[in-house]
Amino acid sequence: MKFVQEHTSQTLEVKQSKFIAHLVPYKIFTQTLTALQEEHPKARHFVVAWRYINEFDQVVEHCSDDGEPKGTSGKPTLAVLSGNGLINTAVIIVRYFGGTKLGTGGLVRAYSDACNLVIKNSELVDYVKLQTYTFHTVYADLSLVEYRLDELGIHISEKDFDEDGVLIKVGAEESIWKIFYAQNKRIIKMKH
């Protein structure tokens, strides 16, 4: 499975209709859609599809035709995302009508092609499931712990300060965590 970390876009033109495909990380989907709707007030349709992994490791999917004939845009776009093994990713296709009707087959092809085009021109990153680890460290060791976490690319998701030090929650690949833990087991206490 793969995902994107950056917003990319590509434009496909079919019989004077413009299909502007935007591929974005799922976490910025809503704000991107709102921004695109403001940026393109004359666009006819904003077809969307997204896939993400929830906290139970289930893939959640959604798509919308946004006024296009049923099944001609959202579903084919979602099928392209799924076929490329993309998760935690959304696509928004802004359509400007060019005056020529494309028919159902033409719409399916145009939306699928626009989605494929933006995926082909985006940087895809391999998805690796992160484990959650929680540990405590004293204030004197905090800057060293943060430095070592940063050095290994481990992201801190939560920090809670108390009178004895800091409770830190991180998400990390198991193999990377083992390296961090080996370096720091004397200055951190694991919490469950």
Image (cartoon, grey):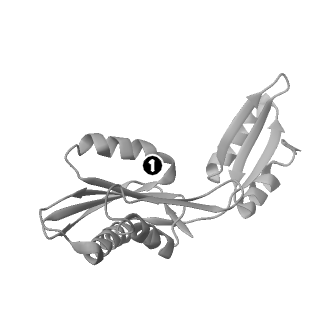
Q: How many dots with numbers?
A: 1
* In-image side of 13 versus 156 (left or right): left
Residue under numbered circle 1: 29
Relative depth, front residue between 66 and 58: 66
Question: Picture coordinates of residue 93 (x, y %)?
Answer: 32, 58
* In-image side of 141 versus 78 (left or right): right
- Of the 4 image quadrants, the one containing the C terminus is top right
Q: Is residue 74 above or below residue 38?
A: below
Residue pushed farthest front? 70
Q: What residue do we see at 29% from left, 77% from top?
A: 105
Relative depth, front residue between 37 and 99: 99
Label 1: which secondary element: helix
Q: What residue do we see at 81% from left, 36% from top?
A: 137
Relative depth, front residue between 43 and 91: 43
Q: Is residue 23 above or below residue 158?
A: below
Question: Picture coordinates of residue 149 (x, y %)?
Answer: 68, 47
Q: What residue do we see at 17% from left, 68% from top?
A: 101
